[in-house]
Image: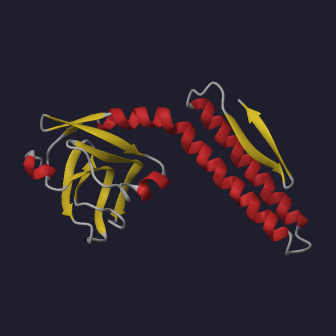
C-alpha cells in the first residue's frame, strides 16, 4: 500500500490492531528505502511511542487530517515520544524526511484511502480480537470458579453479558460485509462450539 508525500511514493505496512501498534518495528533489522509503517487509529487521540527493541533510528511523522503536524527524528535510545491529537503516525528511516524535504505542514495523499481500506479489510480482525478477549474473560471466570464457591448467580450474569457482547461482534462482522466467518467460542466451561454467520 502506498502513500504520496512531497511527490515521493512510500510503500507502507499497516499497523491497525492494538497488538500491531505495540509491536511496531521492534526486532527488525532494517526498513527498505522509501518504505515505512503507517499506524492507523480509529479516532483522533494523544499518542505515546517508544523505541524499545527497535534496532535503527526512525523519523516518526505525526499526522492529522492528512497533514503532518510534527516530525521527531529518534534513535533506538529515545523514549516517551509523544504527540497530541493525531489520527495516524508514519515511521520511516532516520533522515528520510530531511532527504526528501518533508516537513511539518506537508500534505500526505492516501492516508484516508488506506484507513477506509483497512477498516473494510481488517474490520473482521478487530471483532475477532474482541471475541478472543471475551473468551479470555470466560477462562478467567472458569479459573475463579475452581477457587470461589457460591458464585453461580454472578457467574451466570457475567456469562450472559459476554455472550451478548459476542453477538454484537457478530453483527458488526456482518456489517463489514463478510459472507462467512467461523470463530471458535466457548459456549460452556467444558466445551467449544463453532458458529457461522
Res 134 quadrant in image: bottom right
Residue 51, placed above or below residue 18: below
Residue 49 in picture, x, y percent from top left: 34, 63
Please state which of residues 80 and 33 is positioned toward the viewer in this rendering. 33
Q: Quadrant of the C terminus?
A: top right
180 is higher (above) or lower (below) than 62: above
Q: Nearer the viewer, residue 197 or 183?
A: 183
**Does the rendering let one see residue 136?**
yes
Residue that appears at 73% across and 31% down: 196
Q: Is residue 62 above or below residue 7?
A: below
| Total tally of numbered discs in the picture | 0
Q: Position of residue 41 (x, y in %)?
A: 40, 49
Q: Nearer the viewer, residue 188 or 45?
A: 188
Tell me if residue 104 can be seen.
no
Question: Which residue is painted at 22% across and 66% down in the image?
Answer: 75
Where residue 59 sits, quadrant-wise, is bottom left
Q: Position of residue 20 (x, y in %)?
A: 45, 52
Residue drawn 15% across the image and 50% down it: 96
Residue 51, percent across and down? 32, 65
Name which residue lies at 38% across and 55% down. Answer: 24
Left or right side of 44 for 181: right
**Quadrant showing the N terminus:** top left
Q: Outermost residue toward the front?
A: 29
Q: Quadrant of residue 137?
A: bottom right
Amino acid at each position: 500500500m502506498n502513500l504520496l508525500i512531497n511527490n515521493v511514493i512510500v510503500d507502507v505496512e499497516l499497523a491497525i490492531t492494538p497488538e500491531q501498534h505495540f509491536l511496531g518495528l521492534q526486532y527488525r533489522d532494517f526498513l527498505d528505502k522509501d518504505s515505512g509503517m503507517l499506524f492507523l487509529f480509529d479516532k483522533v487521540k494523544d499518542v505515546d511511542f517508544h523505541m524499545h527493541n527497535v534496532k535503527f533510528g526512525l523519523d516518526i511523522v505525526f499526522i492529522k487530517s492528512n497533514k503532518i503536524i510534527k516530525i521527531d527524528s529518534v534513535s533506538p535510545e529515545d523514549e516517551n515520544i509523544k504527540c497530541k491529537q493525531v489520527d495516524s503516525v508514519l515511521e520511516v528511516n532516520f533522515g528520510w524526511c530531511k532527504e526528501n524535504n518533508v516537513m511539518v505542514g506537508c500534505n500526505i495523499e492516501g492516508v484516508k484511502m488506506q484507513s477506509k481500506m483497512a477498516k473494510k479489510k481488517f474490520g473482521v480482525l478487530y471483532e475477532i480480537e474482541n471475541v478472543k478477549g471475551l473468551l479470555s474473560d470466560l477462562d478467567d471466570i472458569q479459573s475463579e470458579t475452581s477457587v470461589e464457591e457460591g458464585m453461580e448467580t454472578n457467574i451466570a450474569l457475567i456469562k450472559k453479558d459476554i455472550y451478548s457482547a459476542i453477538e454484537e461482534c457478530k453483527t458488526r462482522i456482518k456489517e463489514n460485509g463478510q459472507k462467512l466467518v467461523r470463530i471458535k467460542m466457548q459456549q460452556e466451561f467444558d466445551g467449544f462450539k463453532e458458529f457461522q454467520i
